[in-house]
Amino acid sequence: MRLRILGCSGGIGGELRTTSMLLDDDVLIDAGTGVADLSLSDLQKVDHVFVTHSHLDHIACIPFLVDAVGGMRHAPVTVHATAQTLSALRDHVFNWKIWPDFAQIPSAAAPYLQYREIRVGEPVRLGARSITPLPANHVVPAIGFRLDSGQASLVFTGDTTCNDALWEQVNEIENLRYLIIETAFSNAERQLAIDSKHLCPSMLASELAKLKRSAKIFITHLKPGEGALTMEQVQQLAGSYAPEMLTNGHVFDF
């Protein structure tokens, strides 16, 4: 399996792109603004989009993706998400007011888009690959993902705050190799992190103390203009875990 980071910022500006990752060449993990940098031929290869939650920075490019390549494909793009996230997409995006309902275009029998409900702890298998939703704790219903090649696993927490349920499952992953975890705010904005159910460096350090397995750790979802400060605080408080800042273009082979 190969995971390429298309976007990993908590916002936009310059070269910053919001959360989006390409697994091999046919699966997106979230579909933030980084998807827009893919070529049309690359977009056409995407068969599946796995969504952590309904916030715009994670779903922004789903409508454009389906619109751009729906007519070029022989099968619909499948969006995998929890029941709550699927409802949000149907009710608030693909509702003919914000965007056409591509689950009905060009017909209900042969649409450009289809939905598949997923549940925490229940793997979705795509050939030899396994994608398992993990619990997240956010202001809207949310999940993370375990990506398992059979040889190794990568965990992406999605947007989350303190979350014991996540670590219970992560600590059972014997082949864990990589952990991508969010830290959206600096410590000066700790209360905002708590209120919005994100992490700041002090909270991150407390969460990583719950990790009982060895893993290479990467920090994602840094807010524009605060990345350097936040990473400095991360190193001060969680440096023993050797976390690195995730960047666009980073590739994980596992």
Image (tube, grey):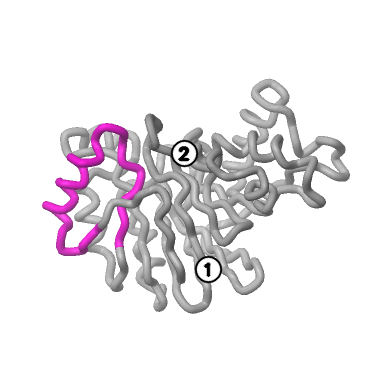
Judge from the rendering whether residue 69 lies leftward or rightward of residue 196; answer left or right. Answer: right
Judge from the rendering whether residue 172 lies leftward or rightward of residue 223; answer left or right. Answer: right
Along the polypeptide, which appears first: circle 1 or circle 2? 1
Query: Which label sits in the foreground, 1 or 2?
Result: 1
Residue under numbered circle 2: 140
Label 2 sits on what residue type? Val
Quarter of the view holding residue 192? top left
Judge from the rendering whether residue 249 lies leftward or rightward of residue 39; answer left or right. Answer: left
Label 1 sits on what residue type? Met
* The residue stretch that appears in magenta: 217-243
The image position of residue 49, as x and y in percent, is 61, 50
- SS at mark 1? loop
Q: How many marks?
A: 2
Q: Residue at x 26, y 32 (%)?
A: 225
Q: Say if the magenta span includes residue 232.
A: yes
Q: Say if the magenta span includes residue 79.
A: no
Q: Are marks 1 and 2 in contact (CB under 8 Å)?
A: no
Is 123 rendered above or below residue 186?
A: below
Q: Residue at x 40, y 48 (%)?
A: 248
Spatial separation of the CA atoms under disc 1 and disc 2 = 30 Å
Q: How crowded is mark 1: few (under 14 residues within 10 Å), some or many (20 or more)?
A: some
In the foreground, 145 or 69: 69
The image position of residue 213, as x and y in percent, is 30, 73
Q: Which residue is drawn at 52% across and 47% down?
A: 30
Residue under numbered circle 1: 1
The image position of residue 33, as x and y in percent, is 50, 37
